[in-house]
Amino acid sequence: MTEPASPILDLAGLTPVPAGKVAAIVTFLEMRARPAPLREPEGHGLQVLRVERPDPGWYRALFRRIGEEWLWFSRLRLSDATLAAILNDLAVEVHVLKRGTEEIGLLELDWRVPGEAELGFFGLVPEETGAGAGRVLMNRATDLVFARPLDRFFVHTCTLDHPAAVGFYMKAGFVPVGRAVEIADDPRLDGTIRRDAARHFPVID
């Protein structure tokens, strides 16, 4: 039986995306010198703490709270063993943003490529966005990264993410350097993420 042909990306028009898939435009950003810090809210009382040997269950719960509305699914599809191997790698740092005892943000730095630091995951729980907590978390990220010698600090985000994400990263000092189209299986169709998540990007099955 002949396999159906994969759609060819039309660089001057529309490319059909099969039902059951999600498509996004990914923007790649990087910085190569320490930027000026972002202005932080006065008296914010926030702390950024490193989590040593994160428990996969704890990590997934915070990851889901932050990213489910933006279809963050990559880490949710990993087995406990695979996720633990990443999180416990000595070149991967997981930090949590806290207000008092409440965990409100996630920062993950990946140093597995020599001379480079990747902002692997960065986000806040929905009720904290837009109030300045992200600026605090980003300032701590750049403090940590530029305390070491490196060639570049980079991140990628996509059109499924918060609509302010690209602008925020650019304000923080990242420069956009490239784009790509990413297509994946819709994580709402296999139960990875709840069916009614990301209403801005409806399910087509």
Image (cartoon, rainbow, N blue to C red):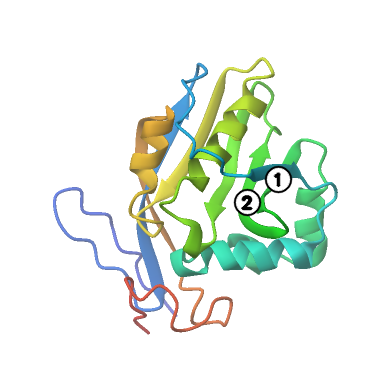
Is 189 situated left or right of 64 in this image? left
Image location (x, y in percent) of residue 13: 14, 55
Residue that sits furthest to the front in the current view:
43
Amino acid found under the numbered disc labelled 1: His
Name the secondary structure under disc 1: strand
Tell me whether the residue at label 2 lies in contact with that at label 1, contact meaning CB atoms closer than 8 angstroms: yes
Is 108 situated left or right of 132 in this image? right
| Residue drawn at x 74%, y 40% as measured from the top left | 92
Residue that mark 1 sits on: 95
Q: In this view, does 202 lie above or below 64?
A: below
Image location (x, y in percent) of residue 32: 50, 18
At label 2, counting other C-alpha atoms closer than 10 Å, the crowd grade (few under 14, some 14-19, many 20 or more) is many
Image location (x, y in percent) of residue 24: 36, 57
Image location (x, y in percent) of residue 149: 67, 14
| Residue drawn at x 49%, y 25% as measured from the top left | 37
Amino acid found under the numbered disc labelled 2: Leu
| Residue drawn at x 55%, y 62% as measured from the top left | 66
Per the rendering, the mark at residue 106 is 2
Quadrant placement of the C terminus: bottom left
Distance, label 2 to label 1, CA atoms, is 6 Å
